[in-house]
Image (spheres, helix red, strand yellow):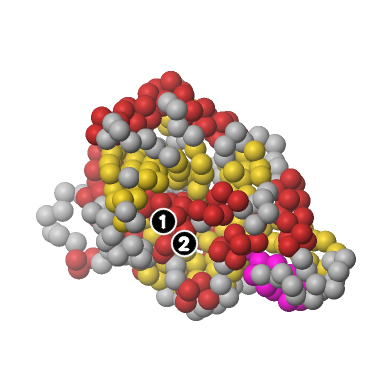
Amino acid sequence: MKDIKAVFDIGNDVIKWVVFANDDGKEIMLAKQVEPTQGMRKWKILDSEAFTNTINKITESFVKKLWWDFIDEVFVSISHPESIVTRVIEQKRIMNEEIQIDDVEHLSRIIADISVKSNYETIKIVPVHFLIDETKREKDPIWMKGKKLELIADVFMIPKNIYNWLIDCFEKVWLNIVDIIPNIISGAEITLDYDHKDLWTILIDIGKNQTSYVIYEDWYPLGYGIIPIWGEDVTKDISIWMQVDIKEAEDIKKTYWSAIVSKDKIPEDSPIDILFLSDIINARYEEIFLRINDHLKELEKDWRLAWGVIIIWWGAKMPNLDLLAKDIFKLATFYGKDNLLNQWDISSNIQFMNVLWTYVRSNKYTEGRTWGWFKFNMGGLSKVFSNATSFFKDLF
């Protein structure tokens, strides 16, 4: 077997881990595991050694199963509540009559160099589009005529201490992280098809660590957003307002949660006040949706997305959350479906969704990962190579 890849989805409560390989051209899953996260709480480092031991325990379990093979590449799927997404625009004058590869590479280098923020580390730079002479938007400007070329790109960052901590912990167990991929990028890659992106839509990823979203119009992302509100906030609200401990609050949420409840459908013998619980849950999710809607208003796109709203990840499991979103956004709302078509036996397991999405994306952009202009997480160096243009074409 060759091309053995390990994908880690780092969560607050558990680490999901799957190893894939290529066996005579066929993609197979070699191992999977869910391990409680040790040494970290709410993405705060509590015990670095405990976290490293968790990674080591996972790795050893794979070695015992397939001792003659080794992991070629490691990918990390991440949702951090303190992540930052910044849109960067850089331009240059075209010296020749036609735009050359050198012009594109020059802009990509500049954006890589200027994408810095104190105490943050850039993990991904994603091109949005090129603009020729301030009017013509293109995905591939090479050989086109123009006097000025602009590159618009989205820069994803996470706190530097978290980045360095992850790299260090994996290196201690002899694993080098090839790429760190924000979940909203891989989720959009798999969940949204061409029509979704072309006909205007917003994808909302409501996870356990944070809520993130991306707005698409005419195939291009208009903007991303990250809201530091997640499932545990709802659990805490239930604990406070229903005066129960955290564990009981979590059980109540999992058993009875629903965003909107019809009075005539509440069982008469229900042991809790379902309507009150629904009000508690609604308050948090209304806060999330209203913040996102404010972003849409800034872009003048509220009520103007033809495909509407698509909800994925844990949020897609909540009954009637789509009805709440529809009421707030005044748009058609759907629960998202990935397009993996049950290729593996874990495709229907929501715990492994981010792992699968990250794996599929890593395969799609293998060339870009090796040669593209973006943050290459091996020793913390940004590298730009000669065939960056082909990577741009793949990303659109």
Does dot 2 land on a helix, a strand or a loop?
Answer: helix
Residue farthest to the front, as pictured: 24
- Identify the residue at horizontal 70%, vertical 36% (top origin): 118
Q: Which mark is drawn over residue 291?
A: none
Q: Please identify the dominant SS of the magenta region.
A: strand
Of residues 185 and 176, the one nearer the viewer is 176
- Pick the quarter of the image with the C terminus: bottom right
Q: Is residue 18 on the magenta stretch?
A: no
Q: How many labels does the image show?
A: 2
Residue occupying the far left of the picture: 269
How far from the left and from the top, in percent, is residue 63?
30, 31
Question: What is the span of residues highlighted in magenta in the rendered image?
Answer: 128-139
Q: How crowded is mark 1: few (under 14 residues within 10 Å), some or many (20 or more)?
A: some
Identify residue type, mark 1: Val
Q: What residue type is labelled 2?
A: Glu
Q: Nearer the viewer, residue 86 or 334?
A: 86
Marking on residue 189 = 2
Where residue 301 sits, quadrant-wise, is: bottom right
**Residue 305 horizontal side relative to residue 9, left or right:** right
Q: Residue 109: x, y in percent?
A: 73, 50
**Residue drawn at the location 27% of the way across and 35% of the way down:** 66
Check whether the beta carbons of the residues at disc 2 and disc 1 lie within 8 A of each other: yes
Question: Who's the residue at 32% across and 45% down the image?
Answer: 1
Q: Can residue 268 be seen in this view?
A: yes
Q: Assess disc 2: are there few (<14), some (14-19) or many (≥20) residues with their C-alpha within 10 Å of its C-alpha.
A: some
Residue under the image location 49 percent in, 34 percent down: 176
Q: Nearer the viewer, residue 284 or 343?
A: 343
Dot 1 corresponds to which residue?
360
- Between marks 2 and 1, how big is the CA–CA gap? 9 Å
Q: Is residue 223 visible?
A: no
